[in-house]
Image (cartoon, rainbow, N blue to C red):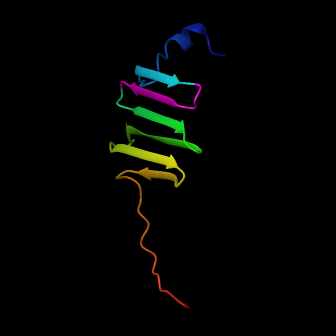
Amino acid sequence: MITADQRASYGPPPNTATILQDKRTRNGYGEYSFQYETSDGTARQESGSQNDGQVSQGGWRYTSPEGQHVDITFLADHGGYQPRGDVLPIAPALPYQRSGN
């Protein structure tokens, strides 16, 4: 059994980030946006609208457990989800040979 004195001695978890910014908007036409940032440098933003289907764009950034800065952006539209960032792997080119007609 844990006593009240033992619970109080734990304190907040290490590396707790606080929210520095949190903005959100939306309207009746399907347009929206949000943005937040925390004290540890983590940030996320996104905006979107209805354009013959949902179209969204945005990104996020954070520091990985290894200390690497990660910055990802994306576009999601009629062409699908299209992320970009230096940390994302790039598939090797597929060999292509035209056959037939």
In percent of width and height, residue 29 lies at 57, 29
In percent of width and height, residue 77 lies at 52, 48
Report which quarter residue 45 is drawn in.
Answer: top left
**Among all residues in the image, which is located at the extreme bottom?**
100
From the viewer's side, name the closer residue of 49 and 15: 49
| Residue ID at (59%, 25%) | 28
Q: Which contiguous range is marked in magenta? A: 28-39
Determine if residue 18 is in view: no
| Residue ID at (55%, 24%) | 27
Determine if residue 3 is in view: yes
Q: In the displayed structure, would residue 6 be above or below residue 43?
A: above
Q: State the quadrant of the N terminus.
A: top right
**Among all residues in the image, which is located at the extreme top?**
4
In percent of width and height, residue 44 lies at 43, 33
In percent of width and height, residue 8 lies at 52, 10
Report which quarter residue 101 is drawn in.
Answer: bottom right
| Residue ID at (50%, 23%) | 25
Image side of residue 32 versus residue 66, left or right: right
Q: In the displayed structure, would residue 91 be above or below residue 57?
A: below
From the viewer's side, name the closer residue of 56 and 96: 56
Q: In the displayed structure, would residue 62 be above or below residue 25?
A: below
Task: Decide whether residue 47 is among the magenta residues.
Answer: no
From the viewer's side, name the closer residue of 81 and 100: 100
**Among all residues in the image, which is located at the extreme right?**
1
Report which quarter residue 93 is drawn in.
Answer: bottom left
From the viewer's side, name the closer residue of 2 and 49: 49
